[in-house]
Image (cartoon, helix red, strand yellow):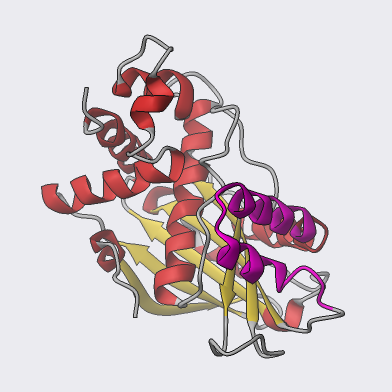
């Protein structure tokens, strides 16, 4: 069993299930964040290392004239105020939280290569949002090995709820095309790191025809309580999804989520050191 970061304890299954118009169940979870300084500090360090490894930050700062905090603020992280920075922050935060769900709740291996290679801080990273892998045994590859691909959307502001889960479902349809590109990007990253075991594990999923496996699709939508509307979630349709029979639908709601996002990014910067 993996050691779970402490903030995962705030992610709680409410037990509620919203039926879609077609009868599929949408699992409703809550992110019950608290004012816990120790957990926030650990979470900030964990979150920062998605973008920039702590043992590399000084080398990355070298030549820029920036302190660690200014490097993160000016070069690496989405902007707090200048559009589209705030929406990119919300999107990155949501993708990383759902990646945590896939890894620590569903028990998949989820490589965290997506943000560390981001070239433009105020743009979303291209490719599938989250890919996770599960291996049946350590002896060799099995046709029962599993690949999970999740598409994530978020709404943490506004006065009217939007159909973000439907948008996630529609985006998930495109993952059938983006999968090969995303797997290749992951494999290339591990090859650059000379992590040949991880490279081989990614490679195992690059040709389903030659090496069959099971595939799970996922669509997740995150909301602040203020933008959460179960009626709009109920209207979600999945009929056109090519993996409809293996499609997981997830909603995560929480209190004042945009304020939480900005507080986390502030700690990521402030606690990076000088």
Q: Which of 176/16 is in front?
A: 176
Q: Quadrant of the C terminus?
A: top left
| Residue 57 location, quadrant | top left
Determine whether, in the image, residue 81 is placed left or right of residue 247.
left
Vertical position of residue 80 compared to residue 23: above or below: above
Determine whether, in the image, residue 234 is placed left or right of residue 252.
right
Residue 190 lies in the magenta stretch: yes
Residue located farthest toward the right when viewing the structure as drawn: 209
Residue drawn at (28%, 62%) of the image: 5
Residue 35 lies in the magenta stretch: no
Determine whether, in the image, residue 28 is placed left or right of residue 221.
left
The magenta segment:
179-208
Q: Which of 57/251 is in front?
A: 57
Number of disc labels: 0
Residue drawn at (27%, 59%) of the image: 7
Vertical position of residue 76 compared to residue 163: above or below: above
Q: Main secondary structure of the magenta part?
A: helix
| Residue 28 position within the rendered picture, expressed as x and y whole percent measured from the top left | 45, 71
Residue drawn at (36%, 46%) of the image: 47
Determine whether, in the image, residue 152 is placed left or right of residue 12.
right
| Residue 48 location, quadrant | top left
| Residue 15 position within the rendered picture, expressed as x and y whole percent measured from the top left | 38, 81
One can see residue 48 in this view? yes
Q: Quadrant of the N terminus?
A: bottom left
């Amino acid at each position: 069993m993996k050691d779970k970061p402490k903030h995962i304890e705030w992610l709680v299954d409410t037990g509620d299930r919203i039926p879609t118009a077609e009868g599929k169940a949408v699992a409703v979870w809550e992110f019950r964040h608290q004012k816990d300084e120790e957990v926030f500090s650990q979470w900030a360090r964990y979150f920062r290392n998605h973008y920039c490894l702590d043992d590399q930050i000084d080398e990355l700062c070298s030549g820029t004239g920036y302190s660690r905090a200014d490097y993160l603020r000016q070069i690496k992280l989405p902007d707090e105020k200048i559009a589209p920075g705030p929406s990119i922050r919300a999107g990155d935060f949501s993708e990383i939280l759902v990646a945590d769900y896939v890894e620590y709740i569903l028990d998949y291996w989820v490589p965290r290569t997506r943000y560390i290679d981001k070239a433009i801080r105020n743009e979303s990273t291209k490719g599938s949002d989250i890919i996770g892998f599960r291996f049946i045994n350590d002896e060799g590859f099995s046709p029962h090995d599993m690949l999970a691909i999740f598409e994530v959307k978020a709404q943490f502001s506004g006065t009217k709820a939007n159909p973000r889960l439907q948008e996630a479902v529609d985006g998930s349809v495109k993952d059938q095309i983006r999968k090969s590109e995303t797997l290749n990007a992951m494999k290339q990253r591990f090859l650059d790191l000379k992590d040949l075991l991880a490279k081989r594990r990614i490679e195992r999923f690059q040709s389903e025809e030659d090496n069959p496996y099971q595939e799970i699709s996922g669509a997740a939508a995150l909301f602040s309580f203020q933008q959460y509307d179960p009626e709009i979630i109920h209207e979600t349709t999945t009929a056109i999804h090519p993996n409809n029979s293996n499609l997981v639908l997830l909603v995560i709601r929480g209190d004042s989520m945009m304020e939480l996002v900005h507080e986390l990014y502030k700690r990521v910067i402030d606690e990076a050191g000088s």
